């Protein structure tokens, strides 16, 4: 991103970046959307079945001030403590990146497991600000 900003500046353009921490989305990953994404990427059926199983039949038990609450089913989310979770989350968010890149012209993205950055450049600051704002709106629509 720094190199991209420097390139824009060397051309006399303005550059702006929207940094989005998406770590909070981990508990709300939709199993169906993740499985659909895996199928769309041509992932092996055995891996898809394993992933669907990994995300199925989950429950949560809360303890509040020593009181154990009733177990409840969990319909969404990826287990944060599993070593495979960052990989599944990256695959899941690849759909977000594709969606935004197809919806907003003139932006570039960079993604890490728990964050995504949207960069825009242009001759006018208001144009540069509008593009990441569109990226944020499209991200919410995708979610």
Image: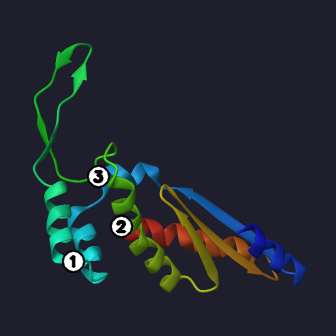
Residue under the image location 10 percent in, 50 percent down: 57
- Between marks 1 and 2 in the image, the one whose residue lies nearer the viewer: 1
Residue under the image location 12 percent in, 38 percent down: 72
Residue under label 3, please give it. Answer: 78
Give the secondary structure at mark 3: loop
In the image, which disc is placed on residue 92? Answer: 2
Inter-mark Cα distance, 3 to 2: 10 Å
Image coordinates of residue 21 in percent, x first then y, are: 53, 54
Within 10 Å of disc 3 (Cα), the crowding (few <14, some 14-19, many 20+) is many
The quadrant the N terminus occupies is bottom right
Within 10 Å of disc 1 (Cα), the crowding (few <14, some 14-19, many 20+) is few
- Decide which of 53, 96 is in the foreground and name it: 53
Image coordinates of residue 89 in percent, x first then y, are: 37, 60
- Between marks 3 and 1 in the image, the one whose residue lies nearer the viewer: 1
Residue under the image location 47 percent in, 74 percent down: 97
Image coordinates of residue 108 in percent, x first then y, are: 62, 78
Give the secondary structure at mark 1: loop
Residue under the image location 24 percent in, 75 percent down: 36
The reply to whether discs 3 and 2 touch (Cβ–Cβ < 8 Å) is yes
Q: Which is more N-terminal, label 2 or label 1?
A: 1
Inter-mark Cα distance, 1 to 2: 16 Å
């Amino acid at each position: 991103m720094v190199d991209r900003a420097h390139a824009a500046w060397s051309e006399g353009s303005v550059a702006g970046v929207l940094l989005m921490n998406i770590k909070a989305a981990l508990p709300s990953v939709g199993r169906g959307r993740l499985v659909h994404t895996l199928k769309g990427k041509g992932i092996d059926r055995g891996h898809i079945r394993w992933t669907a199983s990994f995300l199925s039949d989950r429950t949560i038990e809360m303890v509040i001030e020593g009181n154990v609450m009733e177990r409840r089913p969990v319909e969404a989310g990826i287990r944060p403590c599993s070593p495979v979770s960052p990989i599944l989350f990256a695959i899941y968010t690849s759909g977000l990146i594709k969606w935004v890149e197809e919806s907003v012209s003139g932006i570039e993205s960079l993604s890490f497991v728990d964050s995504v950055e949207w960069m825009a450049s242009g001759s006018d600051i208001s144009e540069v600000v509008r593009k990441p704002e569109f990226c944020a709106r499209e991200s919410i629509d995708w979610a």
